[in-house]
Amino acid sequence: GVLSAGVALVGVPAVISAVGFKTTGIAAGSLAAKMMSAAAIANGGGVAAGSTVALLQSAGAAGLSLAAKIGLSSALGSLGAAVG
């Protein structure tokens, strides 16, 4: 319910950072770097604005507002399903 969704959002910044989306950019050799590479290859050499990778990169670099955390919770759920 709402409580579990709120608890899940508390860990969003840590998860974003743990997969390699850092405040200084994407960490070399990380899952984030692999995601960015795959997205760039699929998109003809660049990462599409508004894509999951672009949103996670922005969130990692700039920090997250509550609205952004709510919006990214579904993206992270999809990421977890794809990785797990």
Image (spheres, rainbow, N blue to C red):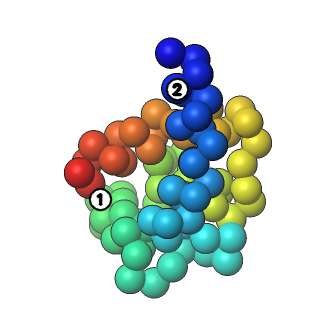
Position of residue 22 in the picture relative to residue 76 (left or right): right
Q: Residue 49 placed where, x, y %? A: 55, 51
Identify residue for label 2. Answer: 4
Q: Helix, strand or loop at disc 2?
A: helix
Q: CA distance from mark 1 to mark 2?
A: 35 Å
| Mark 2 residue type | Ser
| Mark 1 residue type | Ala
Residue under the point 52% across and 26% down? 4
Between 78 and 13, the residue placed more toward the observer is 13
Position of residue 1 in the picture relative to residue 63 (left or right): left
Q: Helix, strand or loop at disc 1?
A: helix
Between 50 and 69, the residue placed more toward the observer is 69
Residue under the point 73% across and 56% down? 63
Between 16 and 50, the residue placed more toward the observer is 16
Between 71 and 17, the residue placed more toward the observer is 17
Q: Residue 39 placed where, x, y %? A: 36, 60
Q: Residue 61 placed where, x, y %? A: 68, 65
Identify residue for label 1. Answer: 42
Residue under the point 51% across and 56% down? 15
